[in-house]
Structures are given as C-alpha cells and as structure tokens.
Image: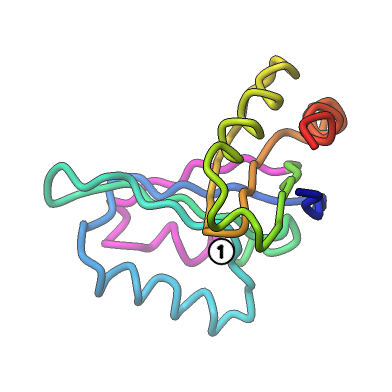
Amino acid sequence: MKPAITVCHDITLITLRNIPADIGFIAEVFDKIAEMGTDVDMISLSPVQSSRTNLSFTVKDDDLVNILSYTSKLDDGSVKSIVSSGNCKITVNDEAMENCPGVAAKVFANAAKADTEIRLITTSESQISLLVTKSDSDAVLSRIKEAF
C-alpha cells in the first residue's frame, strides 16, 4: 500500500459546546454556514449523553470571523465556541484501505512517535485525517510517512 499523504495549512478547529442533541439543529448550523460560502471539512459529533452535546468541525482560518459572528448567537447564546486556529490537516488516502485492517493503528502509532497533541481525527473507509498544530505538522507528517 502506498497511500497519498497530503497536508492542508491554515485550518481552524471550532467546537460548539452545549448544542442541542438534535440532528435538525445540526443541519441548520451547517446550512447557515454553507449560505455564508464557507467550506466545512472535518466534522465530529460527540456521543450524545443527554439532550445536549458537542460538535467539532474545521474551516479555513480566513473564515473564522464569519463563523464566530454566527455561532455566538446560536441557541440564544447558550452555545459556547472553542476555537483553535493555525492548524494543519494531514490526510492519508488510499482506496485499498477499505479492506485492509490495521492502517489506522499504523498511522496512529507513528503519529504518536512525534509526541504531540492530535486535535481531531476523522476517518472514512479510504481516508484518515489528523488535525495538528502547525508547529507539530512537520514532525507528524514525517512519522506518518515512515509508516508507509
């Protein structure tokens, strides 16, 4: 397996804390963000434990001001935004990953060798994306490339 490994720079992680655990509400959030012309990339919903939950997603750093002007008004101000800008997304992509157990384990084990904080992970059958700080991106990228 020889996956494509890519890096996207200038990525902001936004976590909306205390949102209603309602897919209709979540759909409205992403609909409004789309209306603003903002591209959302990585999305992660925390496991729902009650009527409220947390939702994390990434956008380009340049879109942060528009997003915050909208999210600060969500649910009458009860939703809190946590923001981390200046990140990089490292993506490992290969169609052959779909039926190949252990690829995520290999990526995570090698990323761990960089001894850094991973801010967010999203996956699909053929893609693994890690969000890391810009200052740690070269080390994580180097370690992941070693895996393959």
Is 6 placed above or below 136 here? Answer: below
Q: Which residue is drawn at 33% across and 45% down?
A: 46
- Give the side of residue 78 with respect to residue 128, left or right: left
Which range of residues does the magenta coloring cover? 67-85
- Give the side of residue 72 with respect to residue 84, left or right: left
Please name the residue that numbered disc 1 is placed on. 67
Residue 139 x/y as whole percent: 84, 25
Q: Residue at x 75, y 48 (%)?
A: 1
Q: Residue furthest left?
A: 50
Q: Is residue 75 magenta?
A: yes
Is 25 placed above or below 116 here? Answer: below
Q: What residue type is labelled 1?
A: Ile
- Image quarter in which the C terminus is found: top right
Towards the viewer: 25 or 144: 144
Towards the viewer: 119 or 63: 119
Label 1 CA crowd tier, 10 Å (few <14, some 14–19, many 20+): some
